[in-house]
Every structure is written in C-alpha cells, then in structure tokens.
Image (cartoon, rainbow, N blue to C red):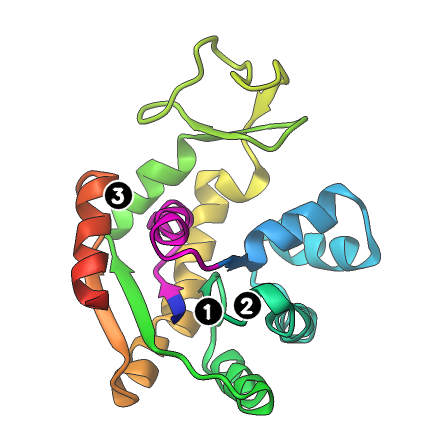
Amino acid sequence: MNLILLGPPGAGKGTQARMIIERYHIPQISTGDILRKAVKDETDLGRRAKTFMDQGQLVSDEVVIGIIDQRLRASDCNPGFILDGFPRTIGQAEALQSILIKIGKSIDHVINIEVDPEELVRRLTGRRTCKDCGAMFHQISHPPKREGVCDQCGGLLYQREDDQEETIRVRLNEYEKQTAPLSQYYQNRRVLRSVEGMGGQAQIFERIVRQLG
C-alpha cells in the first residue's frame, strides 16, 4: 500500500504515520525528519535547508525531490510506503508522479487531515524539542515530567524557531497558498480521502483506517 499524508503543520501527520506503520508494516518517509537530521549534522544539505526552515519557508524542490527519489528506490519500500511532508506543491506532486512511473509504482490513497487553523497555532506553539535526542513534548498534551527537561535523555528542551507563533503563521499561509491545492489535484485522480483531525489520536486513526478499507 502506497500512501501520502496531507495536512497543515501541526495536524498530527507524524503521529498518524507511526500508527499506520505499526498496523500496515510499511516504512514512513518523512522529509521533515530527514531534513532536521541533516541540519543537526550540519551537512551541506542541512545548511541549505536551514535557511528556508528558519524563516518558515518551504525547502527548495531541488533539495526535497532528490531526497525522495533516492529514498523510494530503497528495498524496504517495495511492500509499500507512507509519504509524510511530501509532496507540498503541485510541482512536487508532478515530480513525484514522474519518479513513481520510473520505478513502476503508484499512489493508492492520499489521506488529508483537516484541522482548524487556530487549533494548529495552539498545538505548534506548545511544542518543545530535546536539544540532545530530538524527542518532542507538548506543554499541554504531552508535558515532560520535569519542566524543560527531556524524559528520555535528560537533555534541555527548547522551542524551535519554526514553532514560534510568527513563524507558524507564515508556515500556515505558505501551506494554504501552495499545498492546499493538492487536495483538488488528488481529488481529480480519485485517491483523496479527507479525515477530520480533531479528537484523540486513536479516534483520528480509526477514521483513517475506515478510509483505507
């Protein structure tokens, strides 16, 4: 099963992806995770990506498409995969289609998680990330046992620049302009499955499972 997860920043795509992986045993391909690791490791790709990420802008297509092309050719993607954070634009969707044709694959379902914009701002401004291990917490929904300290490794928690309110609103505006039209793109291809993103994680997951059949 080859899937795409759509939805604005803070919609819970990463969490739902992990639950889908556990149930369907397919790998998650998260451009966000790949890019953040590159930034932390200070690779050439990471330095190029950081200039975009710090300003709440989308990373250039050239960088992201190259990552996806390489990743989809890995052997663990043969049984299927779930794309989280890609494509973000119509141009990327068309580039993805070209890649899939070359490797003999196609997209079975596109899950679109829908959440109210103000709820997204509340969710994202509350996020805190461990400087050492990268674990993520939330001041309301998933607080650490000790304020400002990671439960997993004891590292310091901080608010990423792209989780600050001003940057978040830029990201949401970018999403509406560039990514939201993907809903229509995949609707035209009859693979779009819209899911309400409010409620508990398990409740949202059950909605997704029903859409996947």
User: Is the residue 106 above or below the residue 34 in the image?
Assistant: below
**Alpha carbon separation for disc pair 2 and 3:** 34 Å
In this view of the protein, which residue sits in the foreground, 145 or 202?
A: 202
**Alpha carbon separation for disc pair 1 and 2:** 5 Å
**Alpha carbon separation for disc pair 1 and 3:** 32 Å
User: Is the residue 163 above or below the residue 84 in the image?
Assistant: above
Q: Residue 119 got which mark?
A: 3
Mark 2 and 3 residues: CB-CB less than 8 Å, in contact? no
In this view of the protein, which residue sits in the foreground, 8 or 153?
A: 153
- Left or right? Give the position of 144 relative to 72: left
- Magenta part of the chain: 5-26
Q: Is label 2 or label 3 in front?
A: 2
In this view of the protein, which residue sits in the foreground, 67 or 129?
A: 67
Is residue 65 something that shows in the picture? yes
User: Is the residue 132 above or below the residue 194 in the image?
Assistant: above
Describe the element under mark 1 as helix, strand or loop.
Answer: loop
Describe the element under mark 3 as helix, strand or loop.
Answer: helix
* Crowdedness near tag 1: few (<14), some (14–19) or many (≥20) residues, C-alpha within 10 Å: many
Q: Residue at x 73, y 41 (%)?
A: 40
Q: Write down the residue under mark 2.
A: 77
Mark 1 and 2 residues: CB-CB less than 8 Å, in contact? yes
Is residue 198 something that shows in the picture? no
Q: Residue at x 23, y 58 (%)?
A: 208
- Type of residue at label 3? Glu
Where on the picture, by quarter, is residue 133? top right
* Name of the residue lying farthest toward the top: 146
Q: Residue at x 73, y 50 (%)?
A: 38
N-terminal of the pair, mark 2 or mark 3, is 2
Q: Write down the residue under mark 1.
A: 80
Across and down, in percent, residue 157 comes to 57, 22
Q: Is residue 78 shown in magenta?
A: no
Describe the element under mark 2 as helix, strand or loop.
Answer: helix
